[in-house]
Image (cartoon, grey):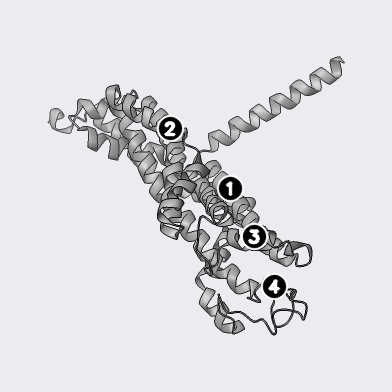
Amino acid sequence: MSDALAVDPAEAEIGTRRVKQRGSGELTIRRLLRDRAALGAFGFVLLLIIFALCAPLVAAATGHGMAQQFRDTGLTSAGIPRGPGHTFLLGTDSLGRDVLVRLAYGARVSLLVGVVASLVAAAIGVTIGTIAGYFGGWADLLLSRVIDLVMSVPFLLCALALVSVRGPSLTLSICVIIFFSWTHIGRVVRSQVLSLRQREFVEAARSLGSGPVSIIVRDVLPNLTVPIVVYTTMMIPSSIVFEATLSFLGLGIVPPAASWGGMLSEALNGSLYMVAWWMVIFPGGILLLTTLAFNILGDGLRDALDPKARRVGFVRLTRRRSSRSARKAAA
């Protein structure tokens, strides 16, 4: 009877750990709701998504298409774009196109590139980093050298070479961004897995006969939630900036399709920003706010998922301030 009721300590440890992982979701949400900066950033991102999804409605409400030119009403007699007003809420560009409508369609491109490229890059990086860290040996050596090789390739030089062969396109932009984005999260995951594979709960799973795939999926990856979520969130603004850079240089979205980087390029190439400030301020401002919002949201997710990291950072900051005060007092 006692043998039937006996519980293997290894099974008990694994079960307890998985229950704690499932129960931590509620605490994470509570911490996130207390972070006003993260909530504000999330609100901005949500509004940006709605703005992008409603781009056709914005065009219908204003009566202005994305590439529709209004040279008679959108430009002055001197050919200068008209500023913000009743007809064009955010003004027009050098061809008399509505800046508001183009911002909405540009948001679609930026969010599509940012989310798709980041998710695919994260999936590649997590897969390669997990394999390299868990199995070690020749797999770790080979994959680590691949990561080093990719990180040594110049981003713009590679983009120029590919565009010269295939021509600029949205698909090519996403592929280039993915190629240069997965290495950072791959390195982080590899270092984390190297530490986790020696932990007691992983050894306990091995002693129970679990295979490598089962251990990775059920025991290793759940403990990588924090770095994966945080780094994926942080990659979204980086991907958006990469896309804007490519479009600014004429290597990304093909005109007349709208993109924030392309809008900035049009304003700066013709020196119109000197008389039409709205052509730079609005696309540049929304690009800046989007990048800032995703970074703040990523910091909030990190603090909510791993409050220890926040406490460690606070302790380090306090120590630095104390040491500075001590040096000033000694002086």
Q: CA distance from mark 3 to mark 1?
A: 22 Å
Q: Is residue 105 above or below residue 185?
A: below
Question: In this rendering, does residue 205 appear at all?
Answer: yes
Task: Kindly check if marks 1 and 4 are in contact, taking CB atoms under 8 A apart as contact.
Answer: no
Q: Which mark is residue 187?
A: 2
Q: Secondary structure at mark 2?
A: helix
Q: Give how far apart the Cα atoms at labels 2 and 3 are.
A: 34 Å
Q: Is label 4 in contact with label 3 (beta carbons under 8 Å)?
A: no
Quadrant of the image containing the N terminus: top left
User: Badge 1 is on which residue?
Assistant: 295
Residue situated in front as seen by the camera: 11 or 155: 155
> N-terminal of the two: label 1 or label 4?
4
Q: Nearer the viewer, mark 2 or mark 3?
A: 3
Quadrant position of residue 43: bottom right
- Of the numbered discs 2 and 3, the one sitting upstream in the chain is 2
Crowd rating for badge 1 (residues with CA inside 10 Å; few <14, some 14–19, many 20+): many
Residue type marked 4:
Leu
